[in-house]
Amino acid sequence: MSTRNSQASKTAARERIRAERERQKKKDRMRRQLVVAVSVVGVLAVAGGIGFAVMKANEPTGWEAAKEAPQVAPAHTQGKDHTEILIGDPKATQTLEVFEDVRCPACAAFEQSSGTALLKDIKDGRYKVRYTMYSFIDGMQGGEGSKNALSALGAALNVSPEAFLKYKTALYSTKFHPDEREDLYAKDSELLKVAAEVPELKNNKAFETAVKKGTYDRWTMDMTALFGRKGVKGTPTFMHGDKKLVMDQIPQRQMTQAQYNQLALAGFKKMIDKEFGPAKGTGAGKDSGGGKGIREGEKDPTGGH
C-alpha cells in the first residue's frame, strides 16, 4: 500500500470517529434536555398539586362554608335575609318578640312552664309573635347543636308555621331537651327522632331531606347573625317594641318542679297582662296558631331589623 493510500485511510477513520462522537454528543444533549423538560413538568405538576391542595385546605368547611352558600329561605318568612319569623293572626295589632336559643336551659324551662300560655295567646289573636333564634351557646359550650336545630326548625317552618311551633315545643320538652353541655342536637338523627312527635313532620320525606342536606344552613347563619339585635344577648328575652319585658323573680327556695312551673306561669301571665292588658277570653282570630302565618307583604310592626 502506498503512503498516500495509508494516509487517506487514516483520515477517513478519524472522520468516522469524529462524526460518531458528534452524533453521540447530540444524543447526550437531547437526553439531558428531555430529562430537564420532564423534571420541569414534574415540578410544575407537583407545585400545581400542592397549590390545589393548599387552596382546598384553605376553603371554609361546615358552618363557615354555609355563610358563603346561596341562601334558601324557608316559606313563611319575610324581611331582610328572610330572618323575620312572624306568626299569628294578621288582625292582631300588637307584636311580642321572643328571643331564644334551642340549647338554652332557661328557654326550655320557660317553654315547659309557660309555652302553652304563649301559644294560646297567639291562637286567640292577643298578639303576633316574632321569633329571633340565636346560637350563642354553641360558642360558649362548643358544638353546633343550636345551629343544627335551628336549620331543622327552618325546614319545619317551610312546612307550616304550625309545624314550626309544634317542633320547637318538642325540642324544648322534658322528654327530649338535653343538658346544654351535651351537644345532642348536633346529630341529625336526634332531630329527626324529635320530629317524629310532630304529625306534620313524621315521615315527611321533604323535611327529612332538608335536615340531612342542611338546606337551611345558610339561612341559619343569617338568622344567628342577628345576635345583639335590640341589645339582646341573653335568652329567653321578651320585648314589645323597644321595651324589654321582665318577669318577677321566682323565690329561691326548695320546691317541686310542678311548683316551680306554677310560679313561672303566673309570672309570665302577670308580665303579659301588665303590658298588653288582661286577656279578653276571645281574640281577633279563631284559626291562628300559626294559621296562615305571615300575611304577604306585611312589615315588621316593631320597626326592627
Image: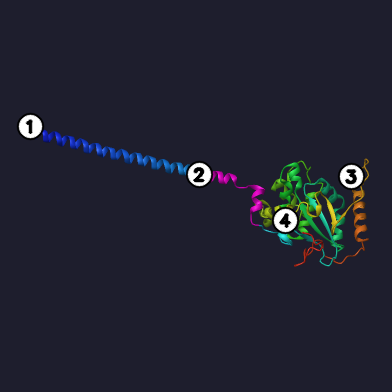
Q: Which residue is mark 1?
A: 3
| Labelled pair 4, 1 in contact (Cβ < 8 Å) | no
Residue 252's place in the image compared with 161, above or below, is above
| Local crowd size for mark 2, using a 10 Å CA cut-off: few (<14), some (14–19), many (≥20) | few
Q: Position of residue 170 (x, y in %)?
A: 79, 51
**Cα distance between the residues tagged 1 and 2:** 69 Å
* Marks 3 and 1, how far apart at CA: 129 Å
Secondary structure state at the residue bearing disc 3: helix
Residue wearing tag 2: 49
| Lower sequence index among marks 4 and 2 | 2
- Closer to the camera, 216 or 205? 216
Which residue corresponds to mark 4?
A: 154
Q: Residue at x 25, y 38 (%)?
A: 22
Residue 257: numbered disc:
3
Name the element at disc 1. helix
Which residue: 22% across, 38% down?
Answer: 19
Q: Residue at x 20, y 35 (%)?
A: 17
- Disc 3 crowd rating (10 Å Cα; few below 14, some 14-19, many 20+) is few
Q: Earlier in the sequence, mark 3 or mark 2?
A: 2
